Amino acid sequence: TLKGKTAVITGSNSGIGLGIARELAKAGANVVLNSFTDRDEDHALAAGIAADHGVTARYIKADMSKPEECRALITQAGACDILVNNAGIQHVAPIDEFPADKWDAIIAINMNSVFHTTAMALPMMRKAGWGRIVNIASGHGLRASPFKAAYVTAKHGVVGMTKTVGLETAKEPITCNAVCPGYVLTPLVEAQIPDTAKRYGISEDEAIEKVILAKQPSKEFVTVEQLAGTVLFLCSDAAAQITGTAIAVDGGWTAA
Ligand code: NAD
């Protein structure tokens, strides 16, 4: 049980981050949700989690593209026993046409934010005598695809940072690991299915299997629940000696 622990999950008002927040709350952790917006529905997500699981849940607005806001998120959280760096964006373009502002945003949100939140959270974990850092990287932290230069660069960087932090905390009751998902059926991916089917003149099922899941040998999407379960495992005592590693949850993608 994670009762009494506080988990901060960046980029958690949708998709994988929200699923992780729900799973950690279900295990008893108090949770801090985050994104760059400050809408009623963001705060309502936190209230819903608190009501469902009897934990404290808050939503704190902080833009992970801004170093000082990354740092302020951890300060405002007040406690951070579990840090899940999940915020991420994507842009697809050949490198010679890749917009420089998109490059900067992806490197800032997907990689630099992990440095800033980790730097702030580690002293708190040391003081508390326990800590778990889980970085949501990607299969693209271990393999490349064309047209995803910024994303692949950032996610490889996160895997490298994970190893370094694992070594720096190796003698302490703190672990730092990366989770590398394959394709996950978040609303973002879901929206691409009808268009892909139309573009290739195939059925939606074929679009999923032959185009979207071309790299995923299982031919099945990874689920948010499976990723949340992996994060929960990394927070458990059984995972205390797992540190500095990158765990692929990708239906065999990076085995090939
Ligand atoms: P998503 O778009 O549903 O979630 C991304 C989250 O990041 C959202 O909550 C969004 O609000 C937040 N975010 C974006 N910009 C932000 C900013 N500037 N500051 C704070 N928060 C910000 O997508 P997802 O699929 O749930 O992705 C979550 C993570 O998983 C990302 O790091 C992504 O790279 C990674 N991932 C996803 C897949 C997939 O197939 N969906 C595969 C591998 C890795």
Image: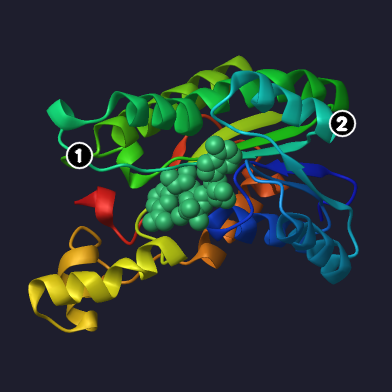
- Picture layout, residue 8 above or below residue 164: below
Q: Please provide percent x and percent y for residue 188.
A: 41, 61
Residue 78 is marked as 2
The numbered mark, 2 or 1, whose residue comes first in the sequence reads 2
What crowding class fits label 1: few (fewer than 14 Cα within 10 Å), some (14-19), or many (20 or more)? Answer: some
Residue at position x 23%, y 71% from top? 195
What crowding class fits label 2: few (fewer than 14 Cα within 10 Å), some (14-19), or many (20 or more)? Answer: few
SS for callout 2? loop
Q: Please provide percent x and percent y for residue 36.
A: 62, 41
Q: Please provide percent x and percent y for residue 193.
A: 28, 72
Q: Quadrant of residue 198?
A: bottom left
Task: Give the residue pinned by disc 1.
Answer: 93
Q: Relative to residue 123, is residue 178 drawn left or right?
A: left
- Picture layout, residue 88 above or below residue 50: above
- Picture layout, residue 251 above or below residue 85: below
SS for callout 1? loop
- Picture layout, residue 147 above or below residue 198: above
Q: Quadrant of residue 72?
A: top right
Q: CA distance from mark 2 to mark 1?
A: 40 Å
